[in-house]
Each structure stands twice: as C-alpha cells, then as structure tokens.
Amino acid sequence: MFVRTATPEDWPAIWPFLHRIVAAGETYTYPRDLGEDRARDIWMLEPPSRTVVATDADGTVLGSAKMNPNHMGPGAHIASASFMVAPEHAGRGVGRALGEHVLEWARSEGYRGMQFNAVVESNTRAVALWRSLGFEVVGTVPEAFDHPAKGFVGLHIMHRYL
Ligand SMILES: CC(C)(COP(=O)(O)OP(=O)(O)OC[C@H]1O[C@@H](n2cnc3c(N)ncnc32)[C@H](O)[C@@H]1OP(=O)(O)O)[C@@H](O)C(=O)NCCC(=O)NCCS
C-alpha cells in the first residue's frame, strides 16, 4: 500500500466512496445529501493543509485522508484530520496506514498535537483505531449526533500529543 498526496485527477475515484459514507449518515457531521461540488471543496485541501490517497500497487484508490490546522492563529499548532476508506477495502489496514501517515505529517510540519473534533461514539471501529494510535477521548458531547439507526449518540473529542 502507498500513501501519496492527492491530485485533482484522484477526485473521481474518491467521490463514490465518500458519497456512500456520507449518505449512510453514520460517521460524519456532513449533510447526508452533500453534493459533489461541495464535497470536493470540503475534501480536496490546498497547502498548508493536505489531502492524501492510499493506493494499492496497481494504483487503485483504497481510501483518503485530509489534514489541516484545527484552528487559526493561536490555535493553529494543533492539527486535525479526517478519514474515509472505501467500504469494500475496509478492515485490511488502510485506515491504520492513513492514520500513521497523518501523524507523521503533523510531526514533520511542527504541530504539537492532533485533535479529532467529532468522532461518533457508536463508530467503534474508528474509536478503537484512534485509541490504538495514541489518542484519548478528552470529552464527549452528549447526544450531539443523530444516528439513523441508534438515535442520539455522543460525539467524542479525541486528542494526542505529537
Ligand atoms: C474507520 C475507518 C477509517 C477504518 O479504516 P479501515 O481501513 O477499515 O481500518 P483498518 O483495517 O486499518 O483497521 C483498524 C482497526 O479497526 C478495527 N477493525 C478493523 N476491522 C474491524 C471490524 N470488521 N470490526 C470492528 N473493528 C474493526 C481494529 O481495531 C483494527 O485494528 P488492527 O489493525 O489492530 O486490526 C474506515 O472504516 C472508514 O472509513 N469508515 C467510515 C468513515 C469513518 O468512520 N471515518 C472516521 C471518522 S472518525
């Protein structure tokens, strides 16, 4: 598996799984009917932020991550990131590889910590993955996410020093 900076040409490979994940409404605080143009603006970031894709040896895009300062000005030394792995390629280490890559990027860019702002409490796979990469839940906003099947569940704020 390879992780590299995404180019505009990668978008047609990213959009189908991003669309599927957002439309499911279980893991992101994006509108479930998010349109393609708005999604591209949200996901495909310019420097100093960054978007990457994970590919297999033949170049197939398996997943993507975006990374950025979490706040501006005096809050700009904490990074944030978001992750989407194509459901058909889940469970084979793509999310972990993207997470490790993002942490390495944030260290090399001089960030002091990384924060995830809204990890859905019921997204147990993601919560377990981020914990295994050194993140802790620093707080949970109760009933902040309206899950299509589980109803109101919490949103974790997760953090780790770099
Ligand atoms: C969450 C997500 C990024 C994980 O990516 P992934 O490629 O499936 O994850 P990995 O294969 O790297 O597995 C990472 C960990 O997830 C857990 N995991 C993997 N498969 C699992 C399964 N079927 N059920 C439960 N947990 C599982 C394990 O803890 C695994 O750790 P391990 O490496 O010790 O086995 C991916 O499922 C995804 O994009 N989900 C939808 C969007 C989303 O939730 N994004 C994150 C928002 S915070």
Image: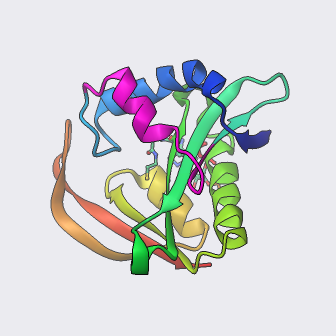
Residue at image x 65%, y 50%?
98
Q: Is residue 146 left or right of residue 104?
A: left
Image position, residue 104 (x, y; %): 71, 65
Picture coordinates of residue 25, whole percent (x, y): 28, 35
Query: Quadrant of the rendered structure where residue 55 is?
Result: top right
**Relative vertical location of residue 127 with respect to residue 57 in this rendering, above or below:** below
Figure quadrant of the N terminus: top right
Where's residue 54, x and y in %?
70, 38
Viewer-proximal residue among 143 and 58: 58
Residue 158 coordinates in the image, percent (x, y)? 42, 70
Kindly identify the residue that appears in the image at 28 percent across and 46 percent down. Answer: 29
Colour logic: rainbow
Q: Magenta part of the protein: which range?
A: 33-51
Q: Residue at x 54, y 55 (%)?
A: 67
* Residue 123 horizontal side relative to residue 32, left or right: right
- 96 or 159: nearer the eye? 159
Find residue 111 and report its image quarter.
bottom right
Q: Residue at x 75, y 42 (%)?
A: 4
Q: Residue furthest right?
A: 57
Q: Quadrant of the C terminus?
A: bottom right
Viewer-proximal residue, 142 or 6? Answer: 6
